[in-house]
Amino acid sequence: MQMVLLTALGVGGATIIGSIIGFIFKNISHKFSDIVLSFAAGVMLAAAVIGLILPSIDYGGKFGIVITVIGIFVGALCLNFIDKLVPHMHKMVGADNEEHSNNEKLSKVLLFVMAIAIHNLPEGIAAGVGFGSGNTTEALLIAGGIALQNIPEGMVIIGPMLAAGITPRKTFVCAMITGLIEVVGTLLGYFAVSVASAILPFALAFAGGTMLYVISDEMIPETHSHGSERGATYALLVGFCVMLVSDVLLG
């Protein structure tokens, strides 16, 4: 349990570390942010496949592939439902953010927090579910991958928030909140699987599905919409391979 708590704090704290770097380098170009976020997307993609989806098939036994496929789609559909239900800024980087129609009455700060929370909560759950499997090495790989992508994510959200007129103090508080949300998600995922180990294969696939949804719906479209598609694509491949090599070395 101590390992889970420390990892949860590390995963959440990575966002805060990234935000501090973001304060130092406020004027991050679109090209740089696209490449950095694409690297993060590659890391998340590898973590989802290697650390969650493939173990889900293994733990599922005879019907592992069926459980895994169902879990992936249920995870994606749940995140899609939350995405439609909760008003938020759909894209987190850049000044041309698309907004839902009922966003006018909500403050800019709340919109940013909601956007990042929708992104971060399933990542935390994924890290917690990984520990619930009992495979500490695999769980640390997932958590490490999520923490690694949280740093650049924390970096690139600071500039737009400051540009939107949010004070530095409120911006940092928002970053802290998003980090805490990931800590809560990690603990939720861990306890859910610990209480009912029978749901482990489904929970792993569910967490993997949420991460695939975030990568496909949020990260790849955002990083490939500012003219840096080629660099972003190679950055994604580098991130994926970094996690792949890490898995082999730690395995």
Image (cartoon, helix red, strand yellow):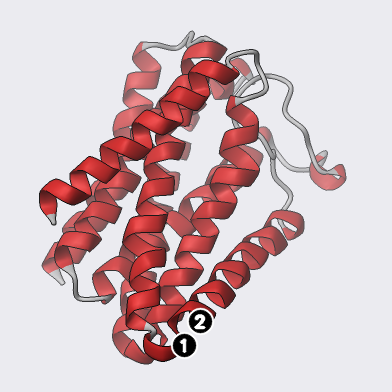
Q: Quadrant of residue 219?
A: top right
Q: Residue at x 23, y 48 (%)?
A: 10
SS state under label 1 = helix
Q: Quadrant of residue 2?
A: bottom left
| Total numbered badges shown on the rendered structure | 2
SS state under label 2 = helix
- Direction from residue 213 to residue 236 in the image, left or right: left
Disc number lying in front (2 or 1): 1
Which label number is shown at residue 63?
A: 1
Answer above or below: position of 140 versus 172. Answer: below
Q: Is residue 111 visible?
A: yes
Q: Position of residue 23 (x, y in %)?
A: 39, 17
Q: Position of residue 124 (x, y in %)?
A: 39, 58
- Direction from residue 36 to residue 244 in the image, left or right: left
Q: Residue at x 33, y 81 (%)?
A: 59
Q: CA distance from mark 2 to mark 1?
A: 6 Å
Q: Amino acid at mark 1?
A: Phe
Q: Dot 1, crowdedness within 10 Å: few (<14), some or many (≥20)?
A: few
Q: Is residue 169 visible?
A: no
Q: Quadrant of the C terminus?
A: bottom left
Check disc 2 and report the residue beneath it. Answer: 67
Q: Amino acid at mark 2?
A: Ile
Q: Position of residue 74 (x, y in %)?
A: 61, 72
